[in-house]
Image (cartoon, rainbow, N blue to C red):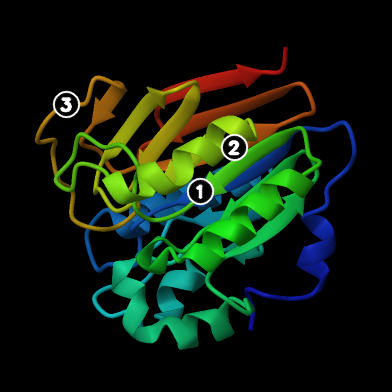
């Protein structure tokens, strides 16, 4: 398909020493007024300075995961590395085929980033063992974990206690810098035990507000949103944009 030419695998490797730019889009595959605006904003960014890839944070297609080609055609023609959410489960096999993934959790190295995509809808003991082995072997300067359900959230669902218990010891032990999630239809940045957590679920689904503010929460916005990741060997920057391409938040991490 248009999304997945083999050439894009080579483009994702980038050039050494330069900041790699990735777009990140969560909870996006819905027929809402702001979904095409967010897609257009990402396209504008890509035309100004191309992305090497696009990550999704799950709930790729509402309501039951069946792919909609029109939504895909509105995005930049780069390789998509998806996470899968609760709305994707009924059509998971179709989405795995579409995005050329063998299973719902996987690892990809993009220059200075080790991106580890987890499947939060069935976080098994086997997946946890795979995660620890993957983190132990990761060699990139930055480790980024991507999944659908947040560990911490001030939104409707409030974060997953089970995922916190399963994942947090590994995040701290293996120095994961950043956790990216969706599920909540808003934007939130949190800091928990030295790890930055960003919830970016405003890519297309109907927006929701916040229920109970977590002590870890630093920034909260009920706004359409997507992210841009930029990374060198020395720094990792995450910038959140709204559907008008205004910056709504930014955080930069630096290696000691």
Q: Is residue 167 visible?
A: yes
- Picture coordinates of residue 228, whole percent (x, y): 55, 38
Q: Secondary structure at mark 1?
A: strand
Q: CA distance from mark 2 to mark 3?
A: 26 Å
Q: Residue at x 30, y 68 (%)?
A: 86
Query: Which is more foreground, mark 3 or mark 1?
Result: 3
Image quarter hosting the C terminus: top right
Residue 229 tag number: 2
Residue 161: x, y in percent? 28, 44
Q: Residue at x 45, y 22 (%)?
A: 193
Disc assigned to residue 24:
1
> Is residue 121 or residue 16 the one in the foreground?
121
Q: Quadrant of residue 213?
A: top left
Q: Rate crowding at label 1 as few (under 14), some (14 to 19) or many (20 or more) other CA atoms within 10 Å.
A: many
First in sequence, mark 2 or 3: give its number: 3
The mark that comes first in sequence, 1 or 2, is: 1
State the residue lying farthest toward the right.
16
Location of residue 99 by image quarter = bottom right
The N terminus sits in image quarter? bottom right
Would you place residue 211 above or below residue 108 in this image? Answer: above
Foreground of the two, 154 or 36: 154
Name the spot of residue 174 as percent of width and height, x first. 64, 35
Where does residue 216 sit, x and y in percent of width and height? Answer: 31, 22
Query: Element type at marker 3?
Result: loop
């Amino acid at each position: 398909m248009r999304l997945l030419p083999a050439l894009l695998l080579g483009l994702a490797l980038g050039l050494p020493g330069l900041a790699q730019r990735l777009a990140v889009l969560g909870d996006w595959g819905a027929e809402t007024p702001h979904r095409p605006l967010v897609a257009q904003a990402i396209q504008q960014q890509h035309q100004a300075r191309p992305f090497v890839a696009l990550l999704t944070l799950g709930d790729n297609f509402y309501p039951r995961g069946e792919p909609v080609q029109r939504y895909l055609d509105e995005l930049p023609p780069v390789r998509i590395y998806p996470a899968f959410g609760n709305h994707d489960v009924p059509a998971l096999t179709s989405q795995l085929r579409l995005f050329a993934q063998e299973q719902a959790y996987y690892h990809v190295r993009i220059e200075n980033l080790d991106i580890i995509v987890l499947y939060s809808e069935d976080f098994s003991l086997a997946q946890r063992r795979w995660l620890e082995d993957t983190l132990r072997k990761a060699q990139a300067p930055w480790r980024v974990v991507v999944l659908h359900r947040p560990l911490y959230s001030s939104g409707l669902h409030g974060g997953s206690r089970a995922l916190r218990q399963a994942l947090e010891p590994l995040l701290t032990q293996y120095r994961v810098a950043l956790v990216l999630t969706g599920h909540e239809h808003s934007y939130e940045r949190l800091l928990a035990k030295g790890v930055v957590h960003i919830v970016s679920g405003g890519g297309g689904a109907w927006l929701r507000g916040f229920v109970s503010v977590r002590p870890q929460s630093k920034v909260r916005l009920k706004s359409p949103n997507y992210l841009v990741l930029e990374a060198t060997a020395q720094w990792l920057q995450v910038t959140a944009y709204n559907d008008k391409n205004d910056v709504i938040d930014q955080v930069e991490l630096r290696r000691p």
